Image: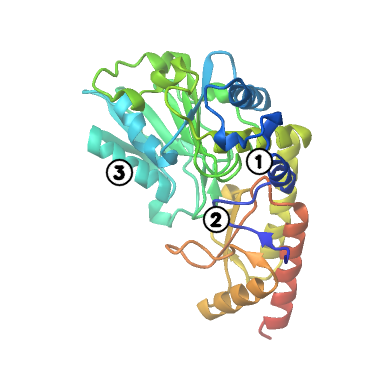
Amino acid sequence: MTAVYNFNAGPSALPKEVLQRAQAELTNFNGTGMSVMELSHRSKDYEAVHQNAIDLLKELYNIPDQYKVLFLQGGASLQFSMIPLQFLKEGTIGNYILTGSWSEKALKEAKIIGNTAIAASTKDQNYQSIPTANDFQFNKNDAYVHLTSNNTIFGTQWQDFPTIDHAPLIADMSSDILSRAVDIEKFGLIYAGAQKNLGPSGVTVAIIRDDLLEANVDQVPTVLRYKTHADSNSLYHTPPTFAIYMLNQVLTWVKEQGGVSEIEKRNKEKAKLIYDAIDESNGFYRGHAEKDARSLMNITFNLPTEDDNKKFLAKAKELGFVGLNGHRSVGGCRASTYNAVPLEACVALREYMDSYRTGHVRG
């Protein structure tokens, strides 16, 4: 089989070592004679995997004791509704910082449930930047303040998170969780779909502060309450067992790499290779994000013309580069350099970008 360089935006690359371990255990997990997909979620063999994944995430991310780790279903998109259902009561406001399409979608769902506001937005700049503290507009009755930490479509990322004192700060970290160190105590709730940095699609991780579990949710369906899942250790109903097994394998791999600090160092090195190719191209490649808002996870850029974009992408496909097309809403090119994307893939892309520019630059 031909090797490829996988820059897919999600579902995205998984560590080769993780895939190989899963392959080796696929039909006989832990000597059970069964696949982990066939085990009861109440069995001791599966519960050990489940608990280990929780413990590893707490260890790797330095999650304080006053937080619970939950495994949920419905993707991060279901969190767009679960959050206002829990916390957006009459007389309060869900306040959203808009930095891209996913924060817009979160706001849209909250509007269905209660009163909302926009604390800040960079939409008028086509989401090329991240708002600063001077831009924020808060309300004394904010139920929470919501942000999206990394914007896959536009290639921007929060470099520093705001300190919010009057309401819980909630973050959708679907596309950059575990890619860098984070001060968990700045947040009341962090949630993330697994399919970028944590594993395959099918499981959503939530990290929630204990006091937020006490929200009055009598009118919220049982399965949509965070407390339901916290009280049952995320075993209230059948969890996505294989996705959690893979999550556990990925977390094990992160620990073997040296933890989040080493992963962050590697991610900066990978991203720099590609951003340097953009910055040193004399305008042949044009990055979408402003430099002080650039994402380590999603690097977005355009060539001089749309025809150039198409030719660049067509040749890249021939050379084994996968997933470099920009999102359909903005076009251009995008390299998603998530944790599992190896350094050599980014080196190869840098070399391709340089050689393509040299062969096509206009005199």
Query: Comparing marks 1 and 2, which lies closer to the viewer?
Result: 1
Q: Amino acid at mark 3?
A: Lys
Q: Amino acid at mark 1?
A: Thr
Could you classify mark 2 by the number of other residues whose Cα lies within 10 Å: few (under 14), some (14-19), or many (20 or more)? Answer: many
Please, which residue is most extreme toward the left here? 90
- The residue that appears at 59% across and 64% down in the rendered structure is 324
Q: Which residue is mark 1?
A: 27
The residue sitting at 23% across, 38% down in the picture is 112
Q: Which mark is residue 108?
A: 3
N-term mark: 1 or 3: 1
Q: Give me the C-alpha separation between circle 1 and circle 2.
A: 45 Å
Q: Which residue is mark 2?
A: 289
Residue visible at 54% across and 53% down in the picture:
155
Q: Quadrant of the C terminus?
A: bottom right
Q: Is residue 35 visible?
A: yes
How far from the left and from the top, in percent, is residue 188? 46, 23
Specify the farthest residue to the bottom.
363
